[in-house]
Amino acid sequence: MSILLVTSSPRGAASHSTRVATDLAQKLVAADPSNTLVVRDLVANPLPHIDPDYASGIYTPAEARTARQAEVVGVSDAVLDELFAADTVILATGFINFNISSTLKSWVDHVARSGKTFAYGEGGPKGLVSGKKVYIVLASGGIYSEGAAVQMDHAVPYLRSVLGFLGMTDVEVIRVEGVGMGADAVTAALAKATAKVDAIAAANTDQVVAAA
Ligand SMILES: Cc1cc2nc3c(=O)[nH]c(=O)nc-3n(C[C@H](O)[C@H](O)[C@H](O)COP(=O)(O)O)c2cc1C
């Protein structure tokens, strides 16, 4: 299994989403010695915002692109190569102003490519990225999985929509939520998320044993 871990929290070493997602990635790798891990750290190496050269370049045949168009489309190509090579994708993000981090949004912008990851046909749009398991690890100061603030969660519905549009419909969410509500809430949120990580890792280990 090839695992792609994408981290994007602007909070550096303090990030809960990076910590929990990294824990998940490491436990999945440990489940089978043949598993591999690729890490794309969007904070250490942010992707450039898409711009006019990108928006025109992706619709220009490779041999006709300007040097700048080739450069910016090349960034997207590299990100897409990583995505297509992965069986399992782990997307880690903090809940920032009611949505995903802007660095992860840039990743989405480079991944959503007409003719590469989606296509329009007679039957409407079709996602071209199939067969992947996606885990979203989302850390938030408030609680958005239930209660009055559910409608303010623009992160999980957005990611489910865009990933589904691209063909990635097997999506599981791990929330580290309520971390803005005091030390006890942080401890409880991390314990709940870690229990979920351990259950996922155990299920993957069972699959490896069953397949052996
Ligand atoms: C700039 C900024 C904006 C934030 N906006 C929200 C928000 O809209 N709602 C919320 O519940 N928490 C918000 N938070 C709190 C984060 O969701 C929380 O710190 C979370 O742990 C961030 O994820 P991380 O730990 O992976 O960095 C914000 C934090 C920062 C730094």
Image: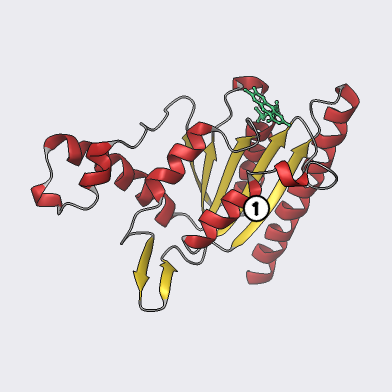
User: Which of the four quarters of the rendered structure image does ligand 1 lie in?
Assistant: top right
Mark 1 element type: helix
| Quadrant position of residue 208 | bottom right
Q: How is the image coloured?
A: secondary structure
The amino acid type of the residue labelled 1 equals Ala
Q: Position of residue 105 (x, y in %)?
A: 49, 39
Residue lying at the far right of the rendered structure: 184
Q: Is mark 1 within 8 Å of ligand 1?
A: no
- Residue 58, given in percent of the width and then of the height, sits at 24, 49
The part of the image, by quadrant, that contains residue 51 is: top left
Report the number of discs: 1
User: Residue at the spot x=40%, y=52% of the render?
Assistant: 112
Q: Say whether residue 60 is left or right of residue 11.
A: left
Q: Residue at horizontal 44%, vertical 41%?
A: 107
According to the picture, the residue beneath numbered tag 1 turns out to be: 31
Which sits in the foreground, 23 or 71? 71
